[in-house]
Amino acid sequence: MRILVTGTAGFIGSELAIRLLERGETVVGIDNHNDYYDPVIKEARLARHADHPRYTHLRIDLADRAAIESAFATHRPDRVVNLAAQAGVRYSIDNPLAYINSNIVGFAHILEGCRHHGVDHLVYASSSSVYGGNTTMPFSVHHNVDHPLSLYAASKKSNELMAHTYSHLYGLPTSGLRFFTVYGPWGRPDMALFKFTKAIISGEKLQIFNYGRHRRDFTYIDDIVEGVIRVLDRPAPPNAEWTGAAPDPGSSNAPWRVYNIGNNNPVELMDYIAALEQALGKTAQVELLPLQQGDVPNTYADVSDLVEQFHYKPSTTIEQGISRFVDWYRSYFDGTA
């Protein structure tokens, strides 16, 4: 197949492109290489697969309607995975329009490309952030998610709604994947694991919000990519039992689905830090601070739909994943970070 993947200089997109190329697919990648975080690591990720004979890279922005239209018309993908987005909960508090332009306007351009060029399945990144003010655990795709706590979360919920209208009106199969705190080698420098590792190595204090009482369903990158591929391989089907009298928020009578991809095993933040200390062989200095605006205290993924429909459940332990990250970090920075 010819698969269009957006965000291929990003953390998840780059890993996905490599996996798809390894199994023989042709991949067209899109990334705008913005400077939300240091673009150097984006170039380094991309360099791992940029020269592959079945890979084409386009440095364009999702908000550039003409460029996206041209990409679809030129490359005519069979399937699309949209991972490009303006990320970050805290950044969205001060820079809301960045999320409108990329996550909503840009996603609309992807939907239009799929609609007009006969794409047979669109898989797109949503987020555990959509659960917002929900407190019933574990978070289930069959729960309502109408109370986002950040514009980032609202933009991801909007993506799910926009995708549903295209599935309903145009018969486009769409699958939204709610990722739960992805971590691992080649990760994002703005994420906690990267920041914590750098601080511990340099002897700086870690700023720990919510006084360390966060619980997160940390999910290792390889588990995320395996889940994306399994969902991509099976276009979303309609739910024949769906009814408007008792609507299921996770499915539809249109070919539309949403799934959680999480480890189904939330970990206390302080236990996460303890695993990092063990891998580094060094003790962290910590500064405990209140919960930050926009943050969700706990996340916990119900992945039963993923297990039942795709016979798959993420399985990498925190100790395994953090150890692999630390090995990569030391290798990438040659021990100088």
Image: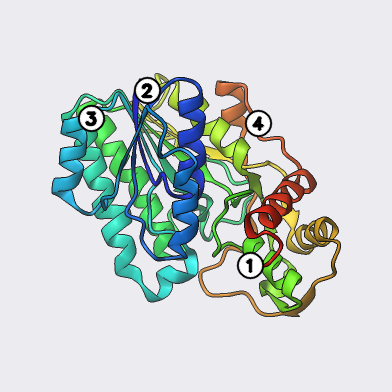
Q: Are marks 4 and 1 in contact (CB under 8 Å)?
A: no
Q: Which residue is mark 2?
A: 238
User: In the rendered structure, which disc, 1 or 3, sits on the residue that comes first in sequence?
Assistant: 3
Q: Position of residue 244 (x, y in %)?
A: 35, 33
Disc on res. 313: 4
Could you tell me which residue is drawn at 38 percent across and 33 percent down? Answer: 245
In what quadrant of the picture does the N terminus appear? top left
Q: Is residue 324 left or right of residue 109?
A: right
Q: Indicate which label's residue lies in the foreground, 2 or 4.
A: 4
Q: Amino acid at mark 3?
A: His
Q: Which residue is mark 3?
A: 75
Could you tell me which residue is drawn at 23 percent across and 54 percent down? Answer: 63
Specify whether residue 136 is in view.
yes
Q: Amino acid at mark 1?
A: Lys
User: In the rendered structure, which disc, 2 or 4, sits on the residue that comes first in sequence?
Assistant: 2
User: In the rendered structure, which disc, 4 or 1, sits on the residue that comes first in sequence?
Assistant: 1
Q: Are marks 3 and 2 in contact (CB under 8 Å)?
A: no
State whether residue 130 is above or below residue 141: below
Q: Which residue is mark 1?
A: 195
Q: Position of residue 148 (x, y in %)?
A: 45, 60
Could you tell me which residue is drawn at 45 percent across and 20 percent down? Answer: 24
Q: Indicate which label's residue lies in the foreground, 3 or 2.
A: 3
SS under mark 4: loop
Q: Is residue 48 left or right of residue 113?
A: right
User: In the rendered structure, which disc, 3 or 2, sits on the residue that comes first in sequence?
Assistant: 3
User: In the rendered structure, which disc, 1 or 2, sits on the residue that comes first in sequence?
Assistant: 1
SS under mark 3: helix
**Alpha carbon distance from label 3 to label 2:** 28 Å
Q: Nearer the viewer, residue 300 or 331?
A: 331
SS under mark 2: loop
Q: Amino acid at mark 2?
A: Pro
